[in-house]
Image (cartoon, rainbow, N blue to C red):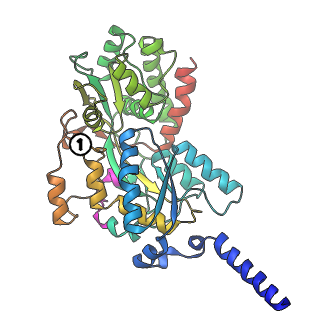
Amino acid sequence: MKFFFYYVLIFSVLLFASCSSSPDNQTDLQNLSWDQILQKAEGQSLNMMMWQGDPNINKYMQQYVVPQVKKQFDIDLNVSNGQGSTIVSVLMSELEAGQQQSELDLVWINGETFYQLREIDALYGPFVSQLPNSKFIDFSNPFIKYDFQQSINGYEVPWGKVQFTIIYDSARVSSPPTNRQALRQYVKTHPGTFTIANDFSGMTFLKSLLIGMAGKGTLSGEFNEQAYQKYSERLWNYINDIKPYFWKNGETFPSNVTAMHQLFVNGELNFTMSNNDTEVDNKILEGFFPQTARAYVFQKGTIRNSHYVGIPKNSTHKAAAMVVSNFLISPEAQYRKARPDIWGDGTVLSKLKVPPKWQQKFAAMPQRYYAPPRDSLQDHALRELAPEYMIRLYEDFRTEIIQK
């Protein structure tokens, strides 16, 4: 009887240890075949954190991605809301606490978030080349290969490609301003109808202005403090000059682009903005924006960039995270995401590399009508700056604009 008791005790301890430890933390997935990774991912539950500020994006995830990865791979994908700063905060806190098992398994990131996570060594990798569908990605495109001038080095998977656009209501604005001087004139003669959001969309707009003031290529490469000081001073002087004519006299700013869209729809603003050049189409198609909404870019260009997914270093479900990442870059998922009536997110796949069936489908994709053709925006596409510029713009917008 005593022997049986000890046998049960030892078995229980071993069982507990096998359940509480992470198989994905103990196994080097880089030595596994894709079939072995698929087998390991089966039945896993995955926590993904991403920005959920757009109903079309949320619908794509909840009504398409979540059921598809369950059906095809038996993976339960749980999606929670959180932007870059939240993701960095969560993973940094876990690392500082010595926590070996992260609550996050997959994160939607780019730019300064990728930079900060790499700085604290919070991302797993390199793993991108192990994903079978990565062979379809257009890595020859510098807007995909580099994230805010950082080589991704296999630590994040390109997911979508977009260009910043300004959206206006053509029923209220007959000739939208296409440069800084014209914008200054418009804002001063139409007080209260323009502003910028205090989020990544607003900072991306400011970054486009900063590049325009410095001259294309002047701020390329690593962060340059002296250059930033020189041109950001001009930027803040410009914004402070027109701020009194902003919405609410420039005394407050929309917290995010979603709030700015609502002000545009309500008729309080004549302009809103978007990091997604197709958003004007899908917002009109869903009946949210007026039929008279249009998108355009400044003559000197706007920021074009890509966004990515990454796997936290201490994720306990890395195999499932890799399988879901691979699904996200499948021709099927990329095609659906790129449709203007679904999300309108530009594909990261090379249309010459995908199978012929998908080449035909991408070629016959429903066109957008309210934004300029994506190919025509190429000549007005600005490369992202080093991530420190975005971080500084966030900080200095608060001290130089909001608090003044």
Q: Quadrant of residue 28?
A: bottom right
Relative height, residue 299 to residue 111 (above, below): above
Graded by Cα atoms within 10 Å as few (under 14), some (14 to 19) or many (20 or more), the crowding at tag 1 reads few
Residue 39 found in image quarter: bottom left
333 vs 220: above or below: below
Rendered location of residue 298, percent (x, y): 28, 29
Identify residue for label 1: 378
Location of residue 150 in the rendering, given as x and y in whole percent from the top left corner: 44, 52
Determine the residue positioned at 56% across, 76% down: 27
Q: Is residue 138 visible?
A: no
Q: Quadrant of the N terminus?
A: bottom right
Span of residues in magenta? 135-144
Total tally of numbered discs in the picture? 1
Q: Is residue 242 above or below residue 59?
A: above
Eyeballing the image, is 212 above or below 241? below
Identity of the residue drawn at 14% across and 51% down: 364
The x and y percentages for residue 74 are 43, 67
The residue positioned 23% from the left and 39% from the top of the image is 377
The picture places residue 105, in percent across and down from the top left corner, at: 53, 59
Q: Is residue 90 visible?
A: yes
Along the horizontal axis of the image, is 95 left or right of 170?
A: right
Q: Quadrant of the C terminus?
A: top right
